[in-house]
Amino acid sequence: MDVLTTTEMERADRLTIAAGTPGFALMMSAGQAVAEAAMDLVEEGPIVVVAGRGNNGGDGFVAAAELAARGREVSVILLCERDSLQGDAALAAKGWKYPVLPFNPQALGKPALIIDALFGAGLNRPVKGDPLEMIGAINANGTPVLAVDLPSGINGTTGAVMGAAVQAAETVTFFRKKPAHLLLPGRMYCGRVRVADIGIAAQVLDEIKPLTAENLPEAWRWSFPVPRIDGHKYARGHAVVVSGDLASTGAARLAARAALRAGAGLVTLASPRDALAVNAAALTAVMVRAVDNPIQFAELLGDKRLNACVIGPGAGVSARTRDFVHTALSAQRHLVLDADALTSFAGAPDRLFEAIKASDGQQVVLTPHEGEFPRLFSDISNKHPGRSKLERVRAAAERSGAVVLLKGADTVIASPDGRATVAANAPPWLATAGAGDVLSGIIAGFLAQGVAAFEAASIGVWMHGESASEAGPGLIAEDLTEVLPAVFRRLYDEFGIEY
Ligand SMILES: NC(=O)C1=CN([C@@H]2O[C@H](COP(=O)(O)OP(=O)(O)OC[C@H]3O[C@@H](n4cnc5c(N)ncnc54)[C@H](OP(=O)(O)O)[C@@H]3O)[C@@H](O)[C@H]2O)[C@@H](O)CC1
Ligand SMILES: Nc1ncnc2c1ncn2[C@@H]1O[C@H](COP(=O)(O)OP(=O)(O)O)[C@@H](O)[C@H]1O
Ligand SMILES: [K+]
């Protein structure tokens, strides 16, 4: 599902109004959707609407009137003077036939539900003064909160908290999700997110051409590889994972097994000779080859069937690792660079980026976590409050010429052409040693099958997160690979693929 920035959402609004639907009709639908959600959340008891001076408050007035019409006990607390409201919000307030309460936290009382209609997409500066105090009181009240469009205080486009934010149990947004519903910290304030249809036609998206989507199967349905009846293992690609030395071989084995499970027809572990025995003893379907240096690696890659590589897990931070990366890039292999392969370029990332850009057509995915990201992109800082994770990863992809995947609870994947996905399906217990190694292997498994880098990374991240949910709490990295078949089956069912 496409995700719209607040600016793109305003455009959707304007295009719809230009096509003949009045803005107030959109507000009526929005307010009714909020009332509907409130009815579902609490079947009885008083409801308090906290309304701001803009259209978010207008939605709140519509919801209040609708709920009162359905026999609910409702009161409205308004941030400003009622007669200072303008435009659609003023019209909406006219539909509320009762008095409004002054903007005093005491007025909240102890209702069954609070509807937060203070600020939505129009939030344009940090919250201070009376609204700040009200947000604190709403959060301290202990009553469930239904947020209109966004929890007040959350920046819709970046997901940042602007001073303070309402903690909602549920958020009703309109037409499409906004980045803040997926990116942290915003997502943590939203609770469950409902997307309501308010009469904006999907066709407006043809004009807006949004570049961001939630990472869901529908985003990559048509890139998902399915083994062919007349296929054979070489038709499914051959992935190579570079092993670390004797003391650190486990990470590469995790990646190798994951690549096989993800569907690569064959997987070979390129192992230092002194680690050959330990690797061979621990592997069965994955093959092992002795590779001690970049020259031998280049020889291995002389076999054109070996079409995708993983370098990084357990590889060691060294000039040797850099040379392996350059070898794979010169051999034009699809490539996942993770962990030590990224850190090995910490001093001189431009050399890596030049090498990536120099070879056309190959598919490269960089998979840093937040600790590794600044080693390659030091000026695309994660400390800059105005710059969202989405914007940072997009800038990194453009700079590097690779697909960049920045891990976390809200993994963002961006392509150099500007497209991006945001994942919200990973449970917190996925943060466990070796989970990243498995992810790099899964992605390589899809690259080996000929899936383009952006889609391979998006499929990989989604399946990785689903596998963690499937395995449940107590997960260790090894489990992820073992539950992948169950996730495949669910996807095949969803896509209607026979098996
Ligand atoms: N687009 C659509 O398709 C649809 C949109 N709809 C709804 O409209 C909502 C957006 O409405 P909106 O633009 O009027 O802004 P809103 O969020 O109500 O803020 C109001 C005003 O607050 C002010 N302000 C800002 N920051 C502040 C601060 N920190 N502290 C104090 N004040 C602050 C600022 O005014 P200022 O003070 O700068 O003049 C701002 O203009 C959207 O979220 C959705 O609910 C639906 O009706 C359906 C269709
Ligand atoms: N809070 C979280 N919720 C969900 N997933 C998370 C969270 N924190 C980290 N992850 C995921 O866990 C994995 C950890 O990978 P990584 O940091 O590379 O660990 P390792 O190097 O030990 O394999 C990544 O896929 C990341 O997206
Ligand atoms: K709100």
Image (cartoon, rainbow, N blue to C red):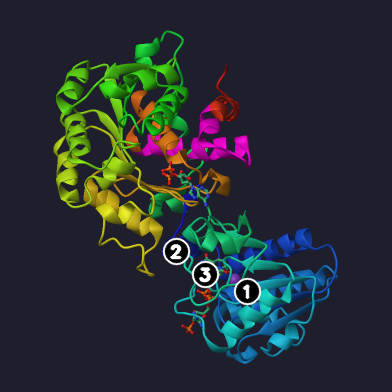
The residue identified by callout 3 is 154
Alpha-carbon distance for marks 2 and 3?
Answer: 9 Å
Confirm whether the magenta stretch covers residue 478: yes
Alpha-carbon distance for marks 2 and 1?
Answer: 18 Å
Q: Which secondary structure lies at badge 2?
A: loop
Confirm whether the magenta stretch covers residue 269: no
Q: Nearer the viewer, residue 262 or 87?
A: 262
The residue identified by callout 2 is 157
Range of magenta residues: 454-481
Q: Which secondary structure lies at badge 3?
A: loop
Q: Position of residue 171 (x, y in %)?
A: 63, 62
Q: Quadrant of residue 389?
A: bottom left
Q: Quadrant of residue 38?
A: bottom right
The residue identified by callout 1 is 117
Q: Main secondary structure of the magenta part?
A: helix
Which kind of residue does numbered mark 1 sit on? Answer: Ala
Residue 162, relative to residue 237: is it above or below? Answer: below
Q: Is residue 8 visible?
A: yes
Check contact, mark 2 vs mark 1: CB within 8 A: no
Distance from mark 2 CB to nearest ligand 1 atom below 8 Å = no
Quadrant where the C terminus lies? top right
Q: Residue at x 61, y 68 (%)?
A: 27
Q: Position of residue 218 (x, y in %)?
A: 50, 38
Label 2 crowd (10 A; few <14 / some 14-19 / many >=20) = many
Question: In the image, ligand 3 is in what quadrant?
Answer: bottom right
Alpha-carbon distance for marks 1 and 3?
Answer: 12 Å
